[in-house]
């Protein structure tokens, strides 16, 4: 596990259009759910197209600590989870990532019991897990939070049932799927999330022998099976990395072809970019984005898939900071996802916030400044800001960016960006950490 990036910063000299071809890595949000799901399996799994990111290395570390045998080679992991015999995960590393809650569903499904440290991750709002708990209780588990642990026990086994989610929750949908695939009988999840990584997790479970139908719709039906077997599986491309690169191409007035993508996953963003006057051309597994002129203002409301993704709201806000006119952005998913605004104001952006809404008055240009990433997608937004700004931008808090983007500076450098990492001085570290 890396620790040295705590003392690093990204240095960007902006104003250079992104041009050329770049390849997207595997989906972070799918990987952090699929890797814990391997616990449900009695055989060996080979997972391919993993992003080379901190969260994947963290799950690898946790699986090994739990007794699994793993071999991680850049973008491929071989996992034999037959040696996992313990249902308690109290390692401090669990607290470093939000997706550690998938260990609860996987352990509960396999052993009928789970005790996992309450998860951490980016501080972007309350992100409650009440729908996870509701689903597990409905399946017959007793669930309680105690001494910083979430404890779930199903002494009589899990029994399939109908579960209605009060709000659309990706995490709860996936966690209930993990718990239900080995439960007795049939489980129906109503008002389920439709995100591409929900479908990817369902496809992986089915590859192991599960019976999951309806993923990608608002009703998922699961018929419990007795056991799952090993398989080989390749994770889908990362929808959010794709979107970040599309936005960066538009922000720098570039001409960028993004490869290894699924264009249908990007339709909400593509539509908004075209509304701004950006040219978006879709291939079978590629998207070309060109933007010779200044974008025009638009309104954006974040919504569950297939709506506009909350994870792309922050980079999109940065793009609109230099668009013509005033844009209105409404954040309907997370209540604290405007933490990047104060940072881009330091770069000259004219943005006002009112609760879950912000108004972005387009300015001619941003100028480089020292800024700090406070969460993963805010970090991506600041990278976009640095790429489009005049002068030099220094971004601290690189640890957040590394959680979700596979060597982002290398990819950007390959298409014309002037970006590199530097060690932070003691004075800088004191200021930012």
Image: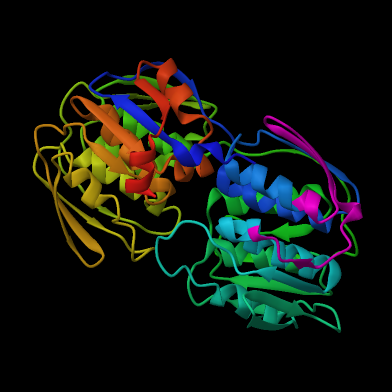
Residue range (magenta): 63-92
Q: Residue at x 49, y 67 (%)?
A: 168
User: In the rendered view, would you say 19 is above or below 226?
Assistant: above
Q: Position of residue 88 (x, y in %)?
A: 78, 68
Rendered-image quadrant of the N terminus: top right
Q: Position of residue 227 (x, y in %)?
A: 90, 60
Colour mapping: rainbow
The residue lying toward the viewer, choosing from 31 and 428, is: 428
Q: Residue at x 78, y 59 (%)?
A: 211
Q: Is residue 275 visible?
A: no
User: In the rendered view, would you say 241 is above or below 18?
Assistant: below
In the image, is residue 82 part of the stretch drawn in magenta?
A: yes
User: In the rendered view, would you say 82 is above or below 256?
Assistant: below
From the viewer's perspective, is 266 left or right of 149? left
The residue lying toward the viewer, choosing from 96 and 247, is: 96
Q: Residue at x 34, y 40 (%)?
A: 428
The residue lying toward the viewer, choosing from 255 and 392, is: 392
Q: Residue at x 85, y 83 (%)?
A: 155
- Tally the numbered discs: 0
The quarter holding residue 253 reads: top left
Q: Is residue 248 visible?
A: yes
In the image, is residue 105 part of the stretch drawn in magenta?
A: no
Q: Position of residue 345 (x, y in %)?
A: 17, 46
Q: Position of residue 233 (x, y in %)?
A: 75, 39
From the viewer's perspective, is 364 left or right of 272? left
């Amino acid at each position: 596990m890396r620790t040295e990036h705590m003392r690093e910063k990204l240095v960007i000299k902006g104003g250079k259009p992104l041009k050329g071809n770049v390849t997207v890595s595997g989906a972070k949000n799918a990987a952090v759910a699929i890797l814990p799901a391997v616990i449900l399996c009695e055989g060996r799994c080979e997972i391919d197209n993993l992003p080379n990111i901190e969260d994947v290395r963290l799950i690898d570390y946790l699986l090994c600590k739990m007794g699994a045998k793993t071999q991680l080679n850049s973008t491929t992991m071989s996992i034999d989870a037959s040696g996992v015999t313990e249902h308690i995960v109290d390692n401090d590393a669990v607290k470093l990532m939000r997706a550690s809650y998938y260990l609860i569903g996987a352990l509960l499904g396999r052993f009928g019991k789970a005790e996992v440290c309450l998860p951490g991750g980016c501080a972007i709002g309350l992100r409650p897990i009440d729908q996870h708990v509701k689903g597990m209780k409905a399946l017959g588990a007793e669930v309680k939070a105690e001494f910083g642990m979430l404890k779930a026990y199903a002494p009589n086994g899990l029994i399939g049932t109908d579960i209605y989610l009060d709000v659309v929750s990706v995490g709860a949908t996936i966690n209930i799927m993990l718990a239900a695939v080995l439960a007795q009988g049939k489980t129906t999840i109503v008002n389920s999330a439709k995100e591409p990584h929900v479908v990817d997790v369902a496809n992986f479970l089915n590859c192991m022998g599960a019976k999951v139908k309806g993923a990608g719709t608002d009703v998922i039906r699961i018929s419990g099976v007795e056991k799952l077997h090993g398989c080989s599986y390749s994770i889908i491309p990362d929808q959010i990395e794709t979107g970040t690169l599309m936005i960066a191409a538009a922000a720098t007035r570039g001409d960028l072809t993004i490869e290894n993508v699924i264009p249908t996953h990007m339709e909400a963003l593509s539509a908004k970019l075209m509304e701004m006057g950006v040219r978006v051309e879709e291939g079978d597994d590629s998207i070309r984005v060109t933007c010779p002129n200044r974008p025009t203002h638009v309104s954006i409301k974040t919504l569950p898939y297939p709506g506009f993704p909350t994870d792309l709201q922050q980079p999109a806000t940065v793009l609109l900071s230099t668009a013509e006119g005033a844009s209105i952005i409404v954040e309907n998913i997370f209540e604290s996802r405007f933490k990047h605004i104060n940072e881009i104001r330091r770069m000259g952006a004219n943005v006002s916030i009112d609760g879950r809404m912000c108004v972005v008055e387009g300015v001619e240009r941003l100028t480089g400044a020292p800024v700090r990433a406070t969460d993963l997608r805010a970090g991506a937004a600041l990278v976009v800001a640095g790429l489009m700004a005049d002068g030099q931008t220094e971004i601290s808090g690189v640890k957040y960016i590394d959680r979700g983007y596979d060597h982002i500076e290398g990819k950007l450098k390959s298409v014309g960006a002037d970006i590199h990492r530097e060690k932070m001085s003691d004075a800088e570290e004191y200021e930012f950490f």
